[in-house]
Amino acid sequence: MLKEYVSITKPGIIMGNLISVLAGYFLAAKSESVTLSLLAYTMVGVALVIASGCVVNNIFDRDIDRKMSRTQNRTLVQGGVNVDHAFLFAIVMLLIGTGLLYKMANPLSAVVVLLGYVFYVFFYTMWYKRTSVYGTLVGSVSGAIPPLVGYLAVTNYISLEAVLLFGLFCLWQMPHSYAIAMFRMQDYEQAGIPVLPVVKGIYKARQHMIAYVVAFSAVAFGLYAFGHTGYEYLVVAAISCYGWSKVTFRRMDESNYIQWSKSVFKTSLLVVTAFSTVLGVELLPLNTMF
């Protein structure tokens, strides 16, 4: 039974978002004093809120999940977990997660994580995902909240650097998500989800993905110009943005769009990991408070 409850929290999504939390935390730590305990509480708090959102998403999307080969065996679709119990599980995790951030970090980080929760559960899951081609854009807002919370847990204020960090991860979400939608178009078509590749076609989606990768690169360099990043960050950003752009600008047509989109997706994972890693590496010479 424990395995079933863990599965509905979508551990893979949680881990991916925690990498971005680290990026925000490490960036803020360049100009503010930090502790390992604060990092631990922030990670656990954000993880619990994300897990809660994923459980609610699983509950609400049961009808869609039944139509998609990738999701039709999910626990809630198969009845492995009682829906009411799952909802209570989600509420408890939401309360504990926001409570941890409020008490152990600061109220601002708790408020922002709740805003992200609202965007993900209500605006994305319950509304735009099912009705609009702009659902991915709405979802990108909630997807960019974890690194912002990691930053705010340290600083307790919103700066230009925080805005750039938020924009960076919003832009990263778009080609990342469109790539998934492209190589899983059949599933999305079967479920009636109006993602861009399904509604506008793969060529239009590719144009959008190129534009977002270029915009991401611009904001990445803007974070160096206006933030507290160092030369190590600049080198990694240049290599990462070049690599992602090179993959995205490759020729794509009906014969290779699945392979192309998978390459864009895999590269996006390398990019976000590289950014988070270099921000942490840049902290190594500093005297961190324990």
Image: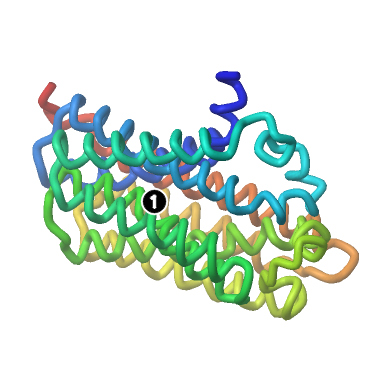
At horizontal 54% and vertical 60% (from top left) the residue drawn is: 125
Give, as a three-letter code, the residue at label 1: Val
Quadrant in the picture for residue 106 = top left
262 to the left or right of 175 = right
Secondary structure, mark 1, is helix
Q: Could you classify mark 1 by the number of other residues whose Cα lies within 10 Å: few (under 14), some (14-19), or many (20 or more)?
A: few
Residue 271: image location, x then y, percent:
50, 49
In the picture, the quarter occupied by the C terminus is top left
In the picture, the quarter occupied by the N terminus is top right
The colour style of the image is rainbow
- Above or below, 84 relative to 174: above
In the rendered image, the residue lying farthest to the front is 84
Residue 219: image location, x then y, percent:
37, 67
- Above or below, 212 relative to 84: below
Residue 236: image location, x then y, percent:
42, 49
At horizontal 61% and vertical 26% (from top left) the residue drawn is: 4
At horizontal 56% and vertical 19% (from top left) the residue drawn is: 2
At horizontal 64% and vertical 47% (from top left) the residue drawn is: 266
> Is 116 or 255 nearer to us in this picture?
116
Residue 255: image location, x then y, percent:
90, 65
> Is 182 or 268 nearer to us in this picture?
182
- Above or below, 223 relative to 283: below
Residue position marked by numbered label 1 in the rendering: 235
